[in-house]
Structure formats: C-alpha cells, structure tokens
Image: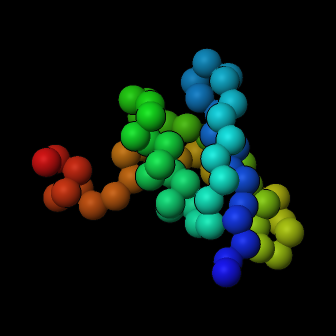
C-alpha cells in the first residue's frame, strides 16, 4: 500500500485546508470540487522527504471532460 501524504492547500484568503491522499493529482481533484477558485498554493512532503511547493491552476483534468 502506498504512503498517504498530507497536502496543504492555501486559498486566496490565506485559509489552509489539509487533505490526505496518496498522490498530488488525487488530492487536487478532491480539493477542486470543494472550491471555485482559479489558483491555489499547495505544499507537501515528497516520497524522498523533500518539501515541495507549487502554484496550481484549477481546474486540473482533461478539458474535454471538464465542460460536461
């Protein structure tokens, strides 16, 4: 079983929400269903123990399926 990681999503109003997931993509997809923002700041610790940060543009996924 893969290791579950904690992803910290910081919204535009500096509110932090933590989601536990096995991958970055799964965490972002579960988060984007809860908010209607265009960009969020994500922090997490990688498998090798390195702290990672990223500005993620929402929504994430296939553009053909997002329009449905």
Residue 58, position in %: x, y?
A: 41, 43
* Residue closest to the eye, 39 or 34: 34
Q: Is residue 39 above or below residue 61?
A: above
Query: In the image, 29: left or right of 18?
Result: left
- Give the residue at the far right of this rendering: 49
Residue 16, position in %: x, y?
A: 69, 31
Query: In the image, 59: left or right of 54?
Result: left
- Give the residue at the far bottom of this rendering: 1
From this viewpoint, is residue 44 visible? Answer: yes
Residue sitting at x 86%, y 69%: 49
Residue sitting at x 47%, y 49%: 30
- Give the residue at the far front of this rendering: 1
Q: In which quarter of the image is the N terminus?
A: bottom right
Among the 4 quarters of the image, the one containing residue 22: bottom right
From this viewpoint, is residue 42 visible? Answer: no
Residue 46, position in %: x, y?
A: 76, 67
Residue sitting at x 67%, y 23%: 14
* Residue closest to the eye, 62 or 6: 6
Residue sitting at x 49%, y 37%: 39
Q: Count up the numbered dots.
A: 0
- Give the residue at the far top of this rendering: 13
Display coloring: rainbow
Query: In the image, 29: left or right of 10?
Result: left
């Amino acid at each position: 079983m893969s290791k579950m990681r904690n992803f910290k999503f910081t919204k535009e109003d500096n509110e932090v929400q933590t989601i536990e997931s096995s991958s970055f993509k799964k965490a972002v997809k579960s988060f984007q269903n809860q908010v209607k923002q265009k960009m969020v700041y994500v922090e997490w610790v990688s498998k090798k123990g390195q702290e990672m940060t990223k500005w993620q543009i929402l929504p994430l996924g296939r553009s053909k399926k997002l329009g449905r």
